[in-house]
Amino acid sequence: MSVVVVLEQQGSHPATVRSTLAQVSTREPVVLPNTSLERTLGSFWRAQTAGWLFGAMFGFVCRIIAFEDLVFALVLTAVLEPIGFSLTALAHSFFRDRIRRGITLMIVAVALMLSVLAGLGQMLVADAIKTAMLPQNDPGLVSSKLVIPAVYYTLVFMGWSLAYLWINAEADARTAWFQRGHAREAALNAELNQLRSQLDSHFLLNALNVVAMEIPESPDIALEMTKRVAAYLRYSLAHHDQRLCSLAEELEAVRNYLRIQELRFESRLDCKLDADPNIEGTRVPHFILQPLIENAVKHGLATTNGPLAISVTAKRVGTQLAVEICNSGRLRKHSRDRPAVGLANTSRRLELHYPDRHRLTIDQEEGKVVVKLTLRGSACYA
């Protein structure tokens, strides 16, 4: 629901977003990191084994230093560390299903209580082994006291429990973040598909109207227009499942459209297209230029007394792709009640594909209207 609210505020299409989120909820689950420690660390058992092996080596060295008895240290380590490994494995089985709905204060309290019990148990086992193997042990030794071993083993289990719960909490947060991101991406992809389909329909409607007007008086021109529209359809269908295309392909679609308009208006229209060959392989969104070209023709003819001159240039400026569309005539302001669909869709697509990495301006410069589009970096949601 939060995704829908955000997109509605940004001027998107809530019906499409809601239907897409419904599809996301009913389709096969996406493989995302699980909340369990196995998913977080790659393998719980690898982490468990590595941790206790390190603890065994550390404890073995400490016991040699404390008791100065290699055999006793070896026996103590060989008994206590496997017990610790088994107890923590049981704790993992106990907590695994209980923390799926979240880590509560009760779970933390139970973990700490079990850690104290496990620490006391380890202390009793260690004292029994010490009594059996070191009967003449000096009671003055720190290691012979029961309090310090109990505290030591309790802290070991508490550390394991808190680390286990903390890592699972982090995994929960990361999983929720992934799920929110996946839902938002699905919604944005649906919006992009709808925006593109609107542009396709808008272009085809205009092109077919033009062809229909030419058939009675100029069937030959209408035939060439039809071929150009067919070329456009081939281009659109060939990239139906792709949101990006090369700049060269995008410019070819622009040429087809401009050729249709040249056939229609003949001497009233003069079009030029110039692109740096080195940037023609740059990937750009499909039909990102089409609405801008349509506006140049439509509004240019309406505001120009003589022939309409249109020029399209594309080049690299530093790290940015710069496209400039110029047409003679005057800049017309659209009514707020009826904004231009093509221009509004283009602006929205740019926001989705190039967030904070694009600039689109439309200005009046002397006797012409200049549209400047700059894109930086690669497009999102490819």
Image (cartoon, helix red, strand yellow):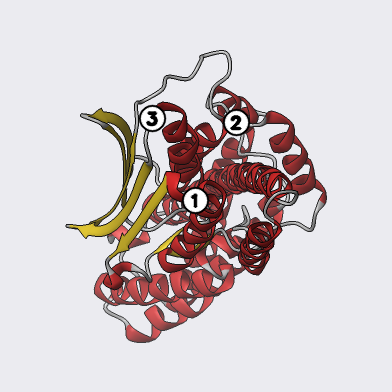
Foreground: 149 or 343?
Answer: 343
Mark 3 — residue?
305
Q: Secondary structure at mark 1?
A: helix
Q: Quadrant of the N terminus?
A: top right
User: Closest to the observer: 91 or 289?
Assistant: 289
Please tell me which residue is depicted at 39% across the width and 55% down the height of the picture: 152
Query: x, y percentage for residue 308?
Result: 38, 41
Answer few, some or many: residues within 10 Å of disc 1's Cα (few below 14, many 20 plus, some between 14 and 19). few
Residue 7, horizontal then vertical, whole percent: 58, 30
Look at the numbered disc 3 and give the secondary structure of its residue: loop
How many marks do you count on the picture? 3
Element under disc 2: loop
Which residue in the structure is indicated by mark 1?
A: 266
Q: Residue at x 42, y 68 (%)?
A: 248
Q: CA distance from mark 1 to mark 3?
A: 15 Å
Q: Position of residue 342 (x, y in %)?
A: 54, 36
Indicate the amino acid at tag 3. Asn
Q: Earlier in the sequence, mark 2 or mark 1?
A: 2
Rendered location of residue 118, percent (x, y): 57, 54
User: Disc 2 residue type?
Assistant: Ser
